[in-house]
Structure formats: C-alpha cells, structure tokens
Image (cartoon, coloured by chain):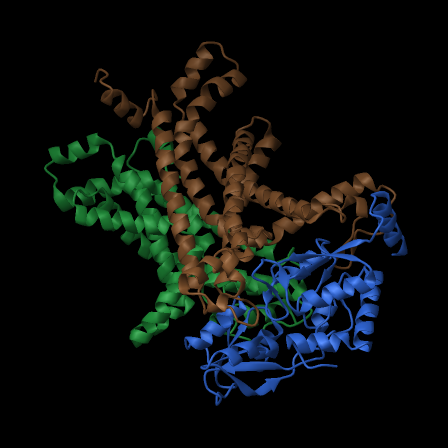
Chain colours: A brown, B blue, C green
Amino acid sequence: MFNFCTDPDTLPKLEWFACYLTTGKHMGFYFSFGTVLLLLAITAPAALLFGFGGASAARARFLPLRWFGKAYISIVRGVPDIAFFLFFVIALDQGFEWMRHKVKCPDWDQPIRQGNDFVVCAQAKLPLGTAPQWVHETYGFSLAVLTFAIVFGAFSANVIYGAMRAVPKAQIETAEAYGMSRRQTFWRILVPQMWVFALPGLSNLWMVLIKATPLLFLLGVEDIVYWARNLGGTANPRFTDYPHADWRMWYFLALLVFYLLFTKVSELVLDRIMRRLSHGQDTAAGEAQRRAAGGPP
Amino acid sequence: MKKLLLATAALALSAGMASAETIRLGTEGAYEPWNYINDKGEVDGFERELGDELCKRTELTCEWVTNEWDSIIPNLVSGNYDAIIAGMSITAERAEVIDFTTNYTPPDPSAYLAMTPDVDVESAVISAQTSTIQASFVAEHGWTLVEFATPEETIAAVRNGEADAVLADKSYLAPFAAEEDDLVLLEREEQIGGGVGMGFRKSDTELKAKFDAAIQSMKDDGTLNALIAKWEVASTF
Amino acid sequence: MSCWQTVQDYALRSVGIGERLLPREDFTLCEQFTLIGSGMIWNIYFGLVALLAGFFLATALAMGKASHNRLLRKPSEWFIFLFRGSPLFIQFFFAYFLFLSLKGVSSVFDPFTSAGLGAAVVLFFNTAAYTGEIFYGALLSIPRGDLEAADAYGFSGWKKFRKISWPTMLRLAWPAYTNEAIFLFHATTLVYFSGFPAWQQRGDALYYASYFADKTFNPFIPYPILAMYFILFTLSVVGVFGLINRRLNRHLPAERRSKLRLRPNLLR
C-alpha cells in the first residue's frame, strides 16, 4: 500500500500497523463489511415480500393455498437457521440445475445421480463452467440472499399474519358497509393499517437478521467473521511479512463494536419510522401524539 | 463419459474459448503451509504452486476457489468445483465417495504438540480439529478427546491448559514448535492416513487421469520433491 | 445389529452412557435417528436451564429499565443493549475466553470452561436480555385503568406488583415470549458449533448431525432428521406455552381472550 512497506520487519510500530492494516488481506476484510451490508439491504425487502406472500397465502380462502402458507410458516420457523443453511443451499443449487437440465438437454441419456455425484449437462450448469470467477461469486451471493429470504420470510409471515388479524374488526366492517369487495378491503383498508401493528415485530426481526449474518460463511460467502478468524489467528513469520500472536480477540472486539453500532443506528431509525406510522392511528401511541400536538382530550 | 467431455469441449469451442478448458480447484485456505491466504489476500502455499504447475502440464486453465472444510466434499460432488486440492489425506472412507489421484506427498506421520515433552498421550487430554482423521484416531483409541472447530483453537487449547497435547499433521505443527519456545513436539508419532492426493468426482475419470499423469511426471523429473522440500510439508519421495 | 440394540447403545451417548465408539461405517438410518436424538438432550438441557433462570433475571431487568432510579435503569439498559446488540457467536467467543482467564485466578471457575455450565451461563444472560426487553415493553403497555384500580383498592408496593403489574405484564408479553423461547432453543445448536469444545464426542444434536454428514458425505439425510426433531420440539414448546397462556388469561371474558393472544407487539 505505502512505499515504506517493502520491509516491514524494520518499521517502527505506527508505520508497521499502517502497513499491516492495509494489506490485500485486510482489504478483503473491509470489503466483507460491504458484502454484509449489501446482503442485509437486499434480504430485508426480499424477506418482507416472502413474508407478505406467506401471510396472504395463510389467510387465503382457497384451501390448498392456505395449507401451503401455514406449512411454510410453521416448518421453516421450527428449524434452527444453522441446520437450514447447512444443506439447503446445495439443495437449492441442485434444484435449479436439475430444472435447467430438463429444459436444455432433453436428449441426455445418462443418469443425473451417479452414486454420490450430481452430473448435469454442461449447458445446464449454474453458472456455466466457463463463466469468470465474479459470476460464480455473485451466484453464490444470490443463493445466500435467497436462503436468508426464505428463512426470515417465514418469521415475517408470522408477524404480518398476526398484524393483519390485529387490525380492528370495525374497520373491515365499515369497508364492507361501504360496498367494497374483499379484494378492495384487503388492499385499501387492511394492508395500509396493518403496518403499525407489524412494525414492532418486524423491527425485532431486523435485529435478529443482523445477528444472523455471522452464519454467512456457512453459505460460502466470505463474510466478516470468516476474515476476522483468518486474520486474527497466529501468523507465522514463514507465511507472512506481518507475524503476530493470536489476535482473534482484537478482531472479534472490532466485530462486536460494529454490531453494537449497527444495532444502535437501527434502533434510532426504527423509532423514527414507528413514530411516523403511529401518526393518526387509533392506538395508544397515536393517541399520545395527538394529545402532544394539542388535540382535544 | 467420453460423450460428456466431448460435449464440454464442443461447448468450450463454440463459446469462443479456443485456448484451454477452465477447471475450478477447491481448497480451504486456512492450513499452512499447504494452503493459506497470503498478505495480498490470494491463495498461496505448497498446493498453490503444485496446482499451478499441474495445470500447466495438463494444459488447463485453473481457477482457485476457497470453501469451508466441512462441506468441501459435498460441494465437489454437487459440481461447484472440479477438484479438491486441500491437504486431504487419502482414506478408505473418502475414497468411497470421491476418486483420489496418486498421492503427491508420501504418507507422513501425525505429531503431538505439547507444553512439556513428557506427556503420556494415553492418559492425557488430546485436542484435535473436529472431523479430521486425527480426531477419529484419538476417539477410536478411547483416549480423552476434546474437539475444536478450527486448528487454531486446538493449539490455543494446549497453551491455556484445556488440553495436554494436540494431534495434527506434523507439517502443520512444526512451525509452531519452531517459532514458540513454550511448545514442543513429542517424540511419539502416529501413522494415520495414506498420503495426500487430489480429489475428483467419480464420474470425472478422464480429468483425474490427466492429473495422475501430470503428478507422475512431476515425481519423475524431481520437481515434486523440490517443491515438498521448499515448503517443508512432508518427507520427499 | 437390530435397531433396538442401537437405541440401547446410543440413546444416552451424548451424556457419556452406553457404547463409547461412535458408528464407523455402514451408517443406518436408525443410528442417525438415535444419535441425533441423543444429542437433543443437550439442546433441551441448555434451553430449559437458560429459560428458567433467564425468566427471573428478565423480570428484574425489565423492572430496572422501567425504574426512575438512574442507578437501576442504566445498568439494565446497558446489559440489554450489549446482549441484544451482538451476535451470540461473538458472546460465546468472549465468554469462553473470559472463563479461561478466570480459571487462572481461582479453581472455582474450572467447570465454567465446559459447555455444560459455561454455555448455559451465556445462553442464560442472552435470553434474559431479550426477554427483559419484551417484559419492559409489556410493562409500559399495562392499561392505566388496571393500575388505578389497584391504587383504589389500597394495594401498594410489593402487593401491587405481585397481584397486578406482574401478572398483567406476563399476559401481555406471553406471545412474544413464546417466540423468544423458540429462538432460544434454536440458538442452543450454536454451543458446540462455534462456541465450546466437545469432550469425548459428547455433543448436541447438531454435533452428531454434522458427524454423520462428515462421515457419509451426504448432508441430505442427517440435517433433515435434525430439522424434524426441532420441528417436533418447537411444536411442543408452542403447545406448553399455549396452555400457560390459557391459564394466564382465564379470568378474561371469552372474546377478549382470543384478542389478547393475537396481539403481535414485540413478536420477533
């Protein structure tokens, strides 16, 4: 990085650290913070979408759809996320390749499962064997996002399902009295009003999601914990220009600070959203706002 | 099988990949001196050099991929990369699921690292990394085994007194014994495993044959021994 | 070997009773079911200990956070923030490190470096923090009328807390607390996975599941078995908590009962 980094053994402490903290390996570490943030930024709306779909399915009038929604919520919620991550990504990947194989190579005459091997034709590989490394990494990342979204979608489906039922009955009845159809009632009355009930649960879920990111390394994504472990371990002078003892503690301390700060910021933002959503709502918080603004008691 | 390779070759040609076929090599990246991530953040070590040389000899383009040790075999058979080159000992169990090339290091003993040289391993607490051949070895002998998730932790356990000795590949432990005054290698060593080889899918026989030939040619012209000596990973052939 | 024989050999393997050697080859479904089930003993143990102990600390933390006294409020707030704001994985790492150093100070701390005690303590603090926040939220949403009624009856101090605030708080917090219990039981799988070492191959359900996944190189059998155990267990947790919920709400008129049960506040 810096010009004076050519011979780290001779450097005084400050310069040594300046060089040490800017090695390519550390750049990978810093980059992984971005990876984690990006994953959170994509996963949160995706999980919300899955949750909304799951909750809507769970209250559908069509029976098989309702069963599907309820089964999704209770099965995925029942399984520890680690157990899910340990086999689900490979299953998902094989599932996609199997479908592409069926479409692209209809006249393939060999079995797909040969003993333990999973063999599909070259055109069906995801990504293609010839694709550059970054495509492979992006694909792995997308699989991770999808897996996270499915898992946390089930939890948010549960929250949204509860929130939909918490909207006061009178509101729905009024809508029906005005002659709205079931669909209109759902989109114009139920959905806009449920958010205030769903938000405490969803914000809690967001906090849990943040803290699930150390599991990313199970999904083959090089996340911050992966790098912290790799960088913190004892560095032998034979294999590095910057030997040091077991420094895992300091790296984990940095991660701790990162997670605490991130939690704090999230809390502040979510509080603000909650206050906005409560505005004009028929709840205790909405009532308090109205009074504070000088409305009649 | 021939058909598959022909199809791949045809595809490679049609996709404009006139030069060479690309294959992906999977490794762990946390097991010095075999494979590790260097200061630049790239895969480095004995197997990096070996793999690059083998790819040159087989006229293939190789890309390096890192993967968690625990899922390194399931990801190979599922087709996420084409070969494992990760200091993996050839064992009968593993050979049932994947095919190994001929070994590129001789079968070497595993060693014990401890704070004092007079540890009696049969009555002591031995630490080992979970799901390694060394962990199975200690468990089978009925000695007191304590398992950690990473190799780093197994050595930390000896330093802080949780375990009396750690059992692992000698080449992994030796740098620690050399570098730090308080750690020593025991005289006793164990013969476990049958050398280290590359792992391939059982259906990829032709690719494996190519690498077998390349390893043999490196054995014959002495370059493999030179590499082994340079990285001090094992005894030479 | 018959399946019944396997059950006899391995059903208590995770606590060190029965056959010492784990199966080495020709793994049967029966062996996988038995050993992974045996590991569940640890998951249930960690979950129960942390949940029971955590319940009391959580009540104290919630009271502390709602208190007007700074000396009570600040420590409770910090405790909750620290444990809710960091991944359990990192808490395990630091706790193990701390227990190791304490061991050097006094031999009293010796048992803490084993998962059985050390990890239970971490899980206890962790769940106390999460539950404390849930209870705190519930404490704030106790209807004012209830408290005024207590005053009118001349209840004060301990009696008011015991008879009015506490039961109402529990009632309001129960749905969210059920979720917390589920999360806690799931979190117990992290103990041997990344926190504490496994002695003599005695581990939890995930430890044995990954043992089989490692030996058979096939993740599609042991992990779904593990998932199945957890789904069954989660369903029974939900069932037990549902029964307690019914009891907590038994004094309410029928239509208000169901309404309270569905209150989604603070679900996580």
Q: Is residue C264 above or below residue C97?
A: above
For residue B108, side relative to residue C54 (left or right): right
**A103 above or below B46?**
above
Splitting the image into 4 quarters, where does residue C146 fall? top left
State the residue lying farthest toward the front: A3
Give the percent coordinates (x, y) of residue A125: 75, 46
Which residue is more in the foreground, B63 or A67?
A: B63
Is residue A12 in sight in this rendering?
yes
- The part of the image, by quadrant, that contains residue A285 is top left
Q: Residue at 57% across / 88% down in the picture?
A: B188
Left or right of B20? Residue B232 is: left
**In this rendering, does residue A82 appear at all?**
no
Q: Quadrant of the N terminus of chain B?
A: bottom right
Camera-side residue: B170 or C58? B170
The structure residue drawn at horizontal position 59% and vertical position 41%, both measured from the top left corner, is A146
**Front residue of A54 and B3:** B3
Q: Residue furthest top?
A: A178
Closer to the camera in the image, A236 or A84: A236
Report x, y in % for residue C11.
53, 67
In the drawing, does residue B235 fall left or right of residue A257? right
The image shows residue C226 at horizontal and vertical percentages of 56, 56
Q: Please give the count of numbered marks on the rendered protein.
A: 0
Q: Identify the residue at image location x=73%, y=54%.
A: B79
Which quarter of the image is occupied by the C terminus of chain B?
Answer: bottom right
Is C82 placed above or below B39 here?
above
Compared with residue A20, is residue A79 higher up or lower down, i.e. above or below? Answer: above
In the picture provided, is B96 more to the left or to the right than A202? right
Q: Residue at x 52, y 64 (%)?
A: C38
> Residue B64, how many percent across, how many down?
68, 57
